[in-house]
Image: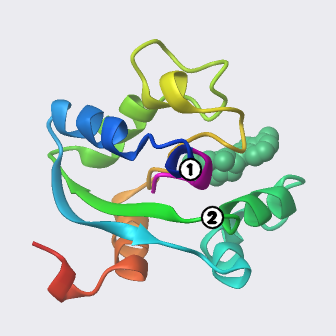
């Protein structure tokens, strides 16, 4: 997912360029928007964390750009490409170093396992939107 602040700032194309330049293939992609309830469900794993309310409000605050990416070792390689959760800790050359504003407004989300990638992909896309 490209998150609301990065979409609003017009960074979608530049972020997709970085993703393609790093060897990922786009299996599905489009704009969408999460309701407050949907954002809460998507991030339910963080329900007990102090930042949960802020995160859910933020993720429902505007359109996002969702994509399913393909690559060998995609989950690990994408997490390397996006960089640390906190952009202040993110390495040079990462998406978050270049585009993230803060720990919450950190430009992109990447799935943390193949199992969650399958769940999150199916949340946004039907099979007829995947190629
Ligand atoms: P993401 O990769 O989408 O997964 C969980 C999100 O929670 C994370 O990116 C951040 O946007 C957010 N997050 C994690 N830690 C904090 C924090 N300390 N304060 C605010 N938001 C956070």
Per the rendered image, the range of residues in magenta is: 1-5
Look at the numbered disc 2 and say if its residue's Cβ is closer than 8 Å to ligand 1. Answer: no
Q: Quadrant of the N terminus?
A: bottom left
Looking at the image, which residue sits at the far top? 92
Say if mark 2 contacts mark 1, CB within 8 Å. yes
Residue named by callout 2: 62
Residue 129 place in picture, x, y as percent:
20, 80
Q: Residue at x 54, y 44 (%)?
A: 6
Q: Residue at x 66, y 62 (%)?
A: 59
Residue 26 place in picture, x, y as percent:
18, 56
- Give above or below for 98 relative to 1: above
- Give above or below for 103 relative to 90: below
Disc nearer the start of the sequence (2/1): 1
Residue 76 place in picture, x, y as percent:
34, 40
Q: Residue at x 49, y 23 (%)?
A: 98
- Give above or below for 20 relative to 4: above
Residue 30 place in picture, x, y as percent:
33, 68
**Residue 8: assigned label:** 1
- Give above or below for 99 relative to 5: above
Taking the image as shown, residue 23 lies to the left or right of residue 100, namely left
Taking the image as shown, residue 43 lies to the left or right of residue 93, namely right
Under circle 2, the secondary element is loop
Decide whether residue 104 is among the magenta residues: no
């Amino acid at each position: 997912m490209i998150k609301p602040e990065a979409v609003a700032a017009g960074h979608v194309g530049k972020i997709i360029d970085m993703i393609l330049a790093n060897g990922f293939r786009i299996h599905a992609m489009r704009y969408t928007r999460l309701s407050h309830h949907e954002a809460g469900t998507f991030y339910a794993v963080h329900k007990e964390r102090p930042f949960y309310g802020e995160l859910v409000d933020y993720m429902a605050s505007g359109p996002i750009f969702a994509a399913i990416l393909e690559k060998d070792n995609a989950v690990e390689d994408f997490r390397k490409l996006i960089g640390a959760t906190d952009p202040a800790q993110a390495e040079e050359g990462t998406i978050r170093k270049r585009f993230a504003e803060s720990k919450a407004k950190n430009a992109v989300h990447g799935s943390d396992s193949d199992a969650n990638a399958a769940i999150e992909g199916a949340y946004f896309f039907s099979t007829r939107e995947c190629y």
